[in-house]
Image (cartoon, coloured by chain):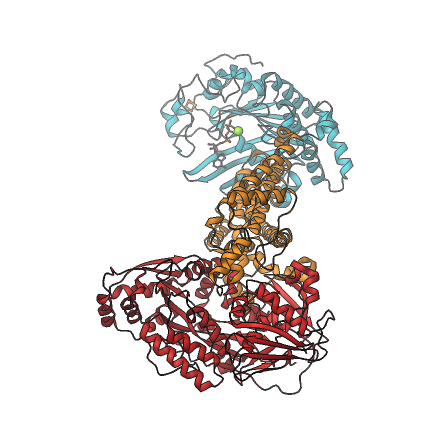
Chain colours: A orange, B cyan, C red
Amino acid sequence: MKAAAGKVAQLLVVMFLVSLGTFSLTSLMPGDPAVAILGDNQSPEAYAELRDKLGLNEPLVERYFTWLGHVFQGDLGTSMVPPNEDVTSLIGSAFAVSIELAVLALVVALVVSIPLAMISARRPDGLLDRAASATTFGIMSVPSFVSGLVLIALLVNQLHLFPRVGWVGVTDGLGQNLYHAALPVITIALLEIPTFTRVLRGDLVRTLQEDFVLSARAKGMPAWRIMIFDAFRPSSYSLITVLGLSLAQLIGSTVIVETLFSLPGMGRLVVSSASQGNITVIQGAVLVIAACYVLINAGVDLMYSVIDPRIRRVGA
Amino acid sequence: MSRPLLHVRDLTTTFTTSRGEVVSVDRVSFDLERGQTLGIVGESGSGKSVLGRTVMGLTSAAPNATVTGSVLFDGVDIANPDKKTRAQYLGARIAMIFQDPLSSLNPVKLIGVHITETLRRHDKSLSRQEARRRAIELLDTVRIPDPARRFGQYPHELSGGMRQRVGIAIALACRPQLLIADEPTTALDVTVQKHVLDLLGMLCEEQGMAMLLVSHDLGVVAGRSDKVAVMYAGRIQEEAVSSDFFRHQRHPYSQALLDAKPHLENPARAELVSIPGRPPDPAHRFPGCRFAPRCRFVQGRCREEEPSLESGGIPSHGAACFYPLDAVRSTQEVSI
Amino acid sequence: MRKIRLLPVGVAATVAALVMMGCSNTTAPASVKADPLKVENGPFGMTAASGDPVSGGSLTFGYGGGIASFDPASQQYSGTSGGDEARAVYGTLTEYDTKAGKYVPSMADSISANDDFTEWTVVLRDGVEFTDGTPYDADAVLFNFDRMAKSGAGFSGLWASVVKKAVAKDAKTVVITLKQKWADFPYLLSQAPGMIASPKAVKDEGESYQREPVGAGPFMLDKWTPGQNLVLKANPDYWDGKPYLDSLTFQTITTGDQALKDAFQAGGIQGSLIGTPAIVKDYIQPSSGYSGYVRMTNTGSMLLINNGTPSRPDTPGKDINVREAIASAINTDVINQRAFDGNAFPGTGIFSAESQWANDKPTFTYDAEAAKKHLADAKGFDGKIELLYPSAQAEAALTIEAQLEAVGFKVDAKPVQSITDLINAVLIKRDYDLAMYGWPVPDEPGELYTSYLERFGRKDNQLGYYNETIAKALSDFAAADDTAEKAAQMATIQAEWAETVPAVPYNTTAQMVVWNKNVHDIEVSSRLTLDFSKAWISK
Ligand SMILES: Nc1ncnc2c1ncn2[C@@H]1O[C@H](COP(=O)(O)OP(=O)(O)OP(=O)(O)O)[C@@H](O)[C@H]1O
Ligand code: SF4
Ligand SMILES: [Mg+2]
């Protein structure tokens, strides 16, 4: 109970600091909402007038606290740029896209990495291990936009298996949703697979040298069973850590993949808002992303204790 | 008596390592009758554990190990078992108890599950409830108080002695005919050691199990084994019926080992303080007797020719020595 | 320029550039260099549809940007930014007939002017209603004019400078009195000011109107996820008959033209708007099997020279010798080869070679010796000059920098990270020496006039340049109804331009709308906006 209260306090502090930090950096952002709204065809006076109307000429501190006041009333405001949507709903829909992409990508990455790591760890430095290691290293050194483009060239342009761009929400049909999510998910997953595989393989190799693995073998357990039921769980701490970090990172920053496939996720929302100086949207997004980091962190801690009964006791 | 339960001949385990070929177990032969206990004693690194594991067919799974010779268990060769044989024998007819009860229990698995998974593995028809009941019964058998509660606990919640009792319970789960106990008490407190050893001895007797009792400590083996084999640098140097062995040791190494015996209070690995020098590097073999560099009685022949158990001249009390100690010393009483 | 909404310049443009690099082998065959791009204004590949139009089906167009807001009062739509979407929902009072080169009535029944083109009468059709059932009448039109004039955005500035007043003569007649003679005034009514929103909906919905528009055009809003996609459905009560298409979708594709092309070929979209020369070239080949429309624009790439603005009164470009030196130093063919792989359309005249206003008046020619001489004549100038350029155009900037340095300039080249920053420096603060900028202006007279008016036809412009002769020629161009007369005015401007060197055009740009062969009867109008009211898909 106490621990939970501590986490909430931590959450609030982090969110406050992050929002304050972002706000104070507003002037460094490339965008200007007045230009974003008016385009490049108006008189200088029109821009000045609009800036005034948007309150951009007020002192930063004042603007921040006005904003903060609204946030405490649960109001994140509206986007400064047409069509001036509600920030909450803007972020809500972008977040739904990002979280789905991130979770699916991580699931795909795990589905590939776990067996791959297990096969590799089975005979360290064996043929399969070396092949897997070379492959993952190769994938690792390819930036996501390149792998994305290769996938596009192959799966979209040649085989016509997936749509090139676009997003269909889950509410518009799970089939279409997954069909549109598939390629970006694979692209992101490719990015994660090498790390996951390597981290897990290393830990599995170490665990497999433990006495309890030998003792499982002495019980007549087959190798696959030992790998899955004895070695995997105690080998998954680093994997969980990396998983948490990846998840947090993916929620806020899959910009390249989102842009590549024209997906309306958090990354693109933040970047395009920054290019417009759309501070209300950025602030809202930053709050959500910061909260995700803190929550995921807490989730990872929780996972540790689920996996390891020894930690559970200490935590209780 | 017909054929022995365990009939080991010329068993050799070689590891291919970066330092070269390491022959950890070298042409080891022995027999073990049903219900009997063979104590295997030797310094650290002498190959006892590898021997135990090889007998269980566990080393052959390691990618860098080669096992030659034969291990006939009840007439079936299990030195290089295939999957099916392994599944049939390991854990069911042959079981093992490990040196460190903490590290040999999976830290993230319930005590009970360690036992039930063995039970259910070897008896597919066993229901979950029945397995649980049997597991609790087993915990009770190894004198664990409040077994139902212990069933639902994790290894780290138990004391060292309790953990090793769990190890025994796991090993006994399927009523094996052979138990390989590799230093079952080395990691335990002195006071606990005796309890565990006595329990083990008692259960063997009750269930008619044969046991390979591996220890670096002659004191552990004394009074708990029918036969004793002394290992040095991968080879058995002396082998005899316990009473004979403890009456008098014929191999100079055995005697040195016995001199080191009072170190029971010091559970660290036995160092042969009475003899200067260290065991030979297993990667560097040399001709002649392996003990020669440290032997007080070494002579010219010892450096040229390798003695075998028969070299001692008494078939019932084998000693791999050209100049056994028969005349040299009187016996010492051994007790724990 | 409204593309800035989706940040094509920052990450997106970088990615897009990388996309193009990565896929260049599939899109820009080596033969491109040997075979310079010949692009002509106008339609291509359109085959006469066999048989009668059939109803049904849905059409998806993919665009790099997309509509920002459905409130026409505050927007300046174009084909690249919301023009098609808004036009589908509202229709426009007039439209540009590209074949006839004339503005003709569309949602309006007729439009006519007095003799000197200072008073315009718009007559509305009988019985037209908005999709909320309210009447599309003179009051509605005036209501929209009024809102637009007061918005401080969109066309309000231009409107205020041109229109004196607009009144309703009767329920379906609006009379607009201008402050000046303007033969192409209907242009304005073919743009956002001619998109009439339901006054009831505007009043009822308030702030959210821009997301839930109500018009009287051929389509109506079905579902819109800004920045993602927009789905419109046919308006069954459209005055000119229910459109053949059941629905019309606009898909936002942020990755650049290559992605549009990919999506096109993968079948995700059936039409698109593309500006990358190499890709345009692929499509307009007769063998490509696509239909579409190409629009060449003039002054698409400009090297703007600050001639002296209040925020930088002592800029080097104040001196005509410096401007002459710059104009003589630029070699557009080299820029084309280095920065555009030979796929661009180099030229230093205001009008592209394809333009209907192209003339024989002098343009700038590359002459390094002359440039050095001019530079020597620039008394008191130390050769230091600053060049602003969008970071996405580094290659072209590098080439220009090298060319200027070769004749003796000391160039301080400064990349700006976003188009916003460039607009800020050039258009709003007017604080720059040289800037790489774009003024894509088509031949269409209405748009040409209003675009150049803002840029150099009036005092206090971004160049800090004013020339009576040019200003007069431009307003005479507007006042004239006769094409030959108009062309003469443009020739005057070109001649004066070459004489006084306000800025240096170095490239023209082409824009292309392209769609599948089985899509018929899409009409192209001003600003490359499309009219889908009669479009249909053959089976
Ligand atoms: N997997 C392996 N690969 C290479 N060498 C090994 C391997 N396992 C054991 N050895 C070597 O075999 C020799 C015998 O080791 P073993 O563990 O059997 O000794 P031990 O008699 O059990 O000693 P201790 O009292 O320390 O347990 C040692 O030199 C050891 O290094
Ligand atoms: S053979 Fe020789 S060296 Fe070896 S133990 Fe016997 S006496 Fe010592
Ligand atoms: Mg050992």
Task: Tell which of B2 and C79 is nearer to you.
Answer: C79
Residue A285 seen anywhere in this rendered image of the structure: yes
Q: How many numbered discs?
A: 0
Q: Does C396 sit above or below residue C536?
A: above
Residue A229: x %, y % from top left: 64, 41
Rendered-image quadrant of the C terminus of chain B = top right
Q: Does C209 sit above or below residue C440?
A: above
Rendered-image quadrant of the N terminus of chain B = top right
* Residue B159 placement: quadrant: top right
Task: Tell which of B231 and C41 is nearer to you.
Answer: C41
Residue C393: x %, y % from top left: 40, 63
Task: Tell which of C412 and A100 is nearer to you.
Answer: C412
Q: Does A120 sit above or below residue B168?
A: below
Residue C453: x %, y % from top left: 45, 72
* Residue B275 placement: quadrant: top left
Task: Tell which of C134 and B315 is nearer to you.
Answer: C134
Q: Does C49 sit above or below residue A284?
A: below
> For the point 37% across and 27% down, which residue is it?
B303
Report whether A37 appears left or right of C332. Answer: right
Report whether C186 appears left or right of C489. Answer: right
* Residue C351 placement: quadrant: bottom left
Residue B96 seen anywhere in this rendered image of the structure: no
Report whether C53 appears left or right of B27. Answer: right
Residue A90: x %, y % from top left: 62, 54
